[in-house]
């Protein structure tokens, strides 16, 4: 009887992210001029930026970075995409729908104004996470 040697399927390489049945993203909340919004000042009252983002995305888990760079980490179900989340977030509070002249490949976003403080988040970016770190 021959020997079978497994060469595929090992998913344990250090430095590689393996989001089993989930996806991980980094969100940088920015205005239309891509200036970061200090979301740590927007995390402690009803309908502030953090709550609005969480209600829209409905993540499995999230983490607001304690700093003024506007960074939020998300864990979502496997069906989400960075482009889809970015589009949805940029539309929050928009005065009109995003428009596209090239068949929905690129969009022009209306300036947004979220409920608390009328803060513009139309320059927000969402990217796939490349690392996952926790601390105790």
Image (cartoon, helix red, strand yellow):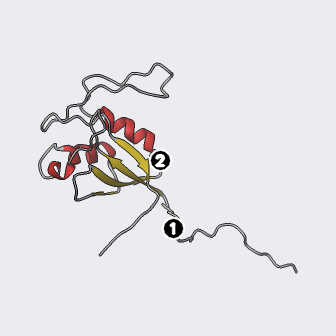
- The circle drawn on residue 38 is none
Q: What SS does tag 1 mark?
A: loop
User: CB atoms at circles 2 and 1 under 8 Å apart?
Assistant: no
Q: Nearest the camera: 121 or 55?
A: 121
- Tell me residue 22's x, y (percent): 45, 56
Above or below for 112 versus 1: above
**Picture coordinates of residue 92 (x, y %)?**
27, 34
Screen quadrant of the C terminus: bottom left
Picture coordinates of residue 98 (x, y %)? 36, 25
Tell me the residue at 29%/32% (across/down). 32
Q: What residue is drawn where x is 32% and y is 47%? A: 28
Q: How many marks?
A: 2
Most extreme residue toward the right is 1
Binning the other alpha carbons within 10 Å of mark 1 as few (below 14), some (14 to 19) or many (20 upward) gives few
> Tag on residue 15?
1
Q: Quadrant of residue 108?
A: top left
Residue 52 in percent (x, y) is at 23, 43
Numbered disc 2: secondary structure: loop
Q: Is residue 96 left or right of residue 16?
A: left
Q: Earlier in the sequence, mark 2 or mark 1?
A: 1
Write down the quadrant of residue 10 in the picture: bottom right
Left or right placement of residue 80 versus residue 122 in this view: right
Mark 2 lies on residue: 79
Q: Quick check: 29 left or right of 87?
A: left
């Amino acid at each position: 009887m021959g020997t079978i040697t497994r060469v595929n399927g090992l998913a344990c390489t250090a430095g590689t992210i393996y989001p089993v049945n989930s996806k991980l993203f980094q969100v940088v909340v920015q205005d239309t001029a891509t200036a970061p919004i200090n979301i740590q000042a927007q995390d402690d009252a009803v309908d502030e930026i953090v709550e609005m983002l969480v209600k829209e995305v409905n993540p499995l888990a999230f983490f607001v970075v304690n700093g003024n760079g506007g960074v939020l980490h998300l864990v979502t179900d496997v069906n989400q995409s960075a482009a889809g989340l970015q589009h949805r977030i940029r539309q929050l509070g928009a005065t009109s729908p995003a428009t596209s002249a090239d068949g929905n490949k690129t969009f022009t976003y209306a300036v947004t104004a979220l409920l608390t403080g009328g803060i513009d988040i139309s320059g927000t970016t969402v990217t796939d996470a490349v690392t996952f770190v926790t601390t105790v």
